[in-house]
Image (cartoon, grey):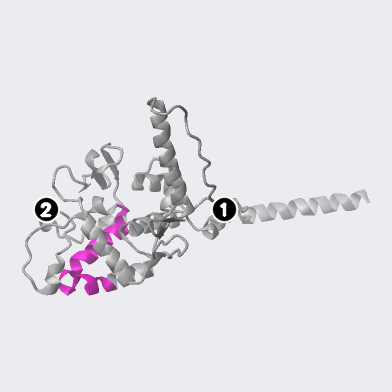
Amino acid sequence: MYSLGKPRSPHTVRGYITCILSIINWAYLQGWLPAPVRIRKIKVGKMKVMKGRPITEVEFKRMLQKVPDVVGEKASQSWKYLLWGLWQSALRLNELMHVSWDIPGTIRPIWKKDSLPVLEIPSTMQKNDTEEEIPLLSWFEKVLLETPAEQRTGWVFNPDSLLLKLGRNVQPRRPKSDWVGKIIGKIGEKAGIIVEHADERTGRPIKYATAHDLRRSCGERMRNAGVPPLLICRILRHASWETTRKHYAPGDVQQDAAMLKKLLSPAPETASQRQASKSEGGTDHTTHNQDR
């Protein structure tokens, strides 16, 4: 199926038809049309929900290795630190770029005496407009603590300008999240990490690793580490586990099977249980001989 010379998937065309039908029927409800319109929808198979995939630790290390090739040696450390933050925090890129040590209205790590550390997330940074505190992942805490205590002020992540690569003077201006995301995409492409292959039928190009794939990776690693699903859901701040499972932590069927086998297999007998079994077996055998 084509639109303006570019092929479209059946799922895309079905979505277009649904939108057009909604507009037409809205016009009917306004009294602008004499009757509602019925259109037969295209039947399509269920598609994979996740657009991308979690990347492996080996692939993440490849991204780190390619950082200097994209941003230059001078800026590379600040960008590597940013990638580590995405890899270990489970935050979205825009959220990570709004993590600060002490700026009001931003996401902040909080350490209190006699309490475990948390991330304080203001309502303005939430999809549900609700202020929230979530546990601070120990992985992410380790990244944060790399900054000496006396330097913990202002923004936590400050990727340097790529102009340093050209040897130019740089104005002290913090980059926008959208631009940072494009650079991370270039790093993923430079590392050759394909998260979704091209589809000639629909015209979809190859998709390389992006910032969001690092968030997916953190979700999957939490699941593989045995973190309870509802806790993963809370860390990722999803309304339901189904959203987390579909988009971020689908899991591995073999790992799930191994876990079931471990949980449902009978526990091995203790020495006292084996002795009791032998005693019962001996008594039954004696009784049986007497009966004969």
Q: Secondary structure at mark 1?
A: helix
Can residue 56 be seen in the rendering of this structure? no
Pick whichever, 252 or 164, lies toward us. 164
Q: Is residue 84 left or right of residue 223?
A: left
Position of residue 197 relative to residue 38, above or below, is: below
Q: In x, y percent, where is residue 74?
A: 15, 72
Q: Residue at x 33, y 72 (%)?
A: 191
Pick whichever, 159 or 289, lies toward us. 159
Q: In x, y percent, where is residue 54?
A: 40, 60
Instruction: Give the extent of the magenta segment.
Output: 66-91
Q: Is residue 5 left or right of residue 121?
A: right
Q: Residues within 10 Å of mark 1 (few under 14, many from 20)?
A: few
Magenta stretch, main secondary structure, is helix
- How far apart in space, not on screen, are marks 1 and 2 (Cα)? 47 Å
**Picture quadrant where residue 196 is located:** bottom left
Pick whichever, 193 or 59, lies toward us. 193
Q: Residue at x 41, y 61 (%)?
A: 204
Q: Give the residue at the far top of this rendering.
A: 31
Q: In x, y percent, where is residue 140?
A: 28, 56
Position of residue 14 relative to residue 8, above or below, is: above
Tag 1 residue: 260
- The label shown at residue 169 is none
Kind of residue indicated by mark 1: Leu
Pick whichever, 31 or 59, lies toward us. 31
- The label shown at residue 153 is 2
Q: Is residue 77 magenta?
A: yes
Q: Is residue 67 left or right of residue 14?
A: left
Q: Give the residue at the far right of this rendering.
A: 292
